[in-house]
Image: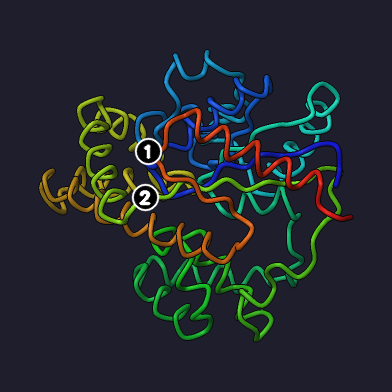
């Protein structure tokens, strides 16, 4: 085992990952990397459940609202910057915390990015034209045929992710998922995954409540300010696209809010599908007492340290 450990907090949206990350950061006297790609952008605060001012002051956070939606920022950029930051953090601490709602971004830091074939620009252009003329459902249907495995775990409401997967399928003649997890990058640290778990009905209740609280906090006003930029990739996400459609007059506000809840529940289900593939996760009940959570994590850390090399 390496001397340094990245404690990686995962779980479905609205489960309490931020609170657990802060609990661990305070216990181990370290800092937090956010791997939630929706929280990178300074213009998107309410709809992405960015940690509150009090939470940000409780522990040092990185990669929270550090970019503008107008700046291009990829998972490759994040991987490079996160690894550089971890090099610095591990000069000071034996442990660091990563809190992640975006499986692709978590995997990039822990395992490195996968190698994909080159794609002719014309393929991407054609897919973007299809998105405009035939809509998102057409791309979802094609991905279901070309790569049923990835179709189950990808955010089906994110056109950027769909087009990326389809262009690789078309260019290579192989499923996009066949290029995933090909090889793991060598990292100078070990990773302990800590997953927060709850019954599905509890997760859904928490999601519904969170959406209501977002609306009360001014999500619609936030979305109205972003409306001129609604075609940017960063804004093709749950909570924003539904309210853009409301502003466009496609349906009433009550229906838009209902769609946000439904699509967030679908997103949480896909997050869990992604996470269940990882049998190394230490699953902890979401409502366990903080002291018990710390005890479970420290016990697992000890067993890692004493595991045979």
214, above or below 122, in the image: above
170, above or below 246, in the image: below
Cα separation, mark 1 vs mark 2, equals 8 Å
Give the position of the C terminus as an image quadrant.
Answer: bottom right
Q: Earlier in the sequence, mark 1 or mark 2?
A: 2
> Left or right: 270 with respect to 277?
left
Query: Quick check: marks 1 and 2 in contact, CB under 8 Å?
Result: yes
x%, y% of residue 302? 73, 40
Residue at 76% across, 39% down: 5
Q: Which residue is mark 1?
A: 287
Q: Residues within 10 Å of mark 1 (few under 14, many from 20)?
A: few
268, above or below 228, in the image: below
Residue 221 appears in which quarter of the rendering?
top left
Q: Which residue is mark 2?
A: 198
> Left or right: 193 with respect to 200?
right
Q: Residues within 10 Å of mark 2 (few under 14, many from 20)?
A: some
Which of the pair 265/81 is nearer the observer?
A: 265
x%, y% of residue 161? 52, 61
Residue at 61% across, 81% down: 175
Element at label 2: loop
Which of the pair 99/291 is nearer the observer?
A: 291
Residue 20 disc label: none
> Left or right: 84 with respect to 245?
right
> Left or right: 1 with respect to 246?
right
262, above or below 183, in the image: above
Count the numbered circles shown. Answer: 2
Residue at 51% across, 58% down: 160
Which of the pair 99/85 is nearer the observer?
A: 99
Element at label 1: loop
x%, y% of residue 153? 48, 66
x%, y% of residue 192? 68, 46
Residue 226 appears in which quarter of the rendering?
top left
């Amino acid at each position: 085992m390496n001397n340094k450990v990245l404690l990686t907090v995962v779980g479905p949206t609205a489960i309490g990952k931020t609170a657990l990350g802060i609990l661990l950061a305070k216990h181990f006297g370290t800092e937090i990397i956010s791997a939630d790609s929706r929280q990178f952008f300074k213009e998107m605060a309410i709809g992405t459940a960015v940690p509150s001012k009090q939470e940000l002051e409780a522990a040092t956070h990185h990669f929270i609202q550090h970019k503008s939606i107008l700046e291009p920022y990829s998972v490759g950029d994040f991987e490079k910057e996160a690894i550089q930051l971890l090099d610095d953090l591990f000069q000071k601490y034996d442990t660091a915390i990563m809190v992640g709602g975006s499986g692709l971004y978590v995997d990039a830091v822990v395992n490195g990015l996968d190698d994909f074939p080159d794609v002719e620009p014309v393929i991407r252009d054609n897919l973007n034209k299809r998105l405009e003329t035939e809509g998102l459902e057409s791309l979802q249907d094609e991905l279901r045929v070309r790569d049923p495995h990835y179709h189950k775990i990808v955010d089906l409401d994110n056109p950027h992710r769909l087009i990326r997967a389809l262009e690789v399928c078309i260019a290579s003649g192989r499923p996009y998922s066949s290029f995933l997890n090909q090889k793991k990058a060598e990292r100078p640290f070990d990773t302990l995954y800590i997953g927060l778990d709850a019954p599905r009905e509890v997760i859904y209740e928490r999601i519904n409540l969170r959406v209501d609280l977002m609306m009360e906090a001014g999500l619609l006003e936030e979305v109205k300010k972003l409306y001129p930029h609604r075609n940017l990739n960063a804004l093709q996400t749950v909570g924003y696209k539904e309210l853009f459609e409301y502003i466009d007059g496609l349906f009433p506000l009550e229906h838009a809010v209902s769609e946000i809840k439904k699509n967030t529940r679908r997103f949480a289900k896909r997050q869990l599908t992604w996470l269940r593939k990882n049998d190394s996760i230490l699953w902890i009940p979401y409502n366990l007492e903080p002291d018990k959570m710390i005890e479970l994590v420290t016990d697992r850390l000890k067993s890692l340290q004493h595991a045979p090399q």
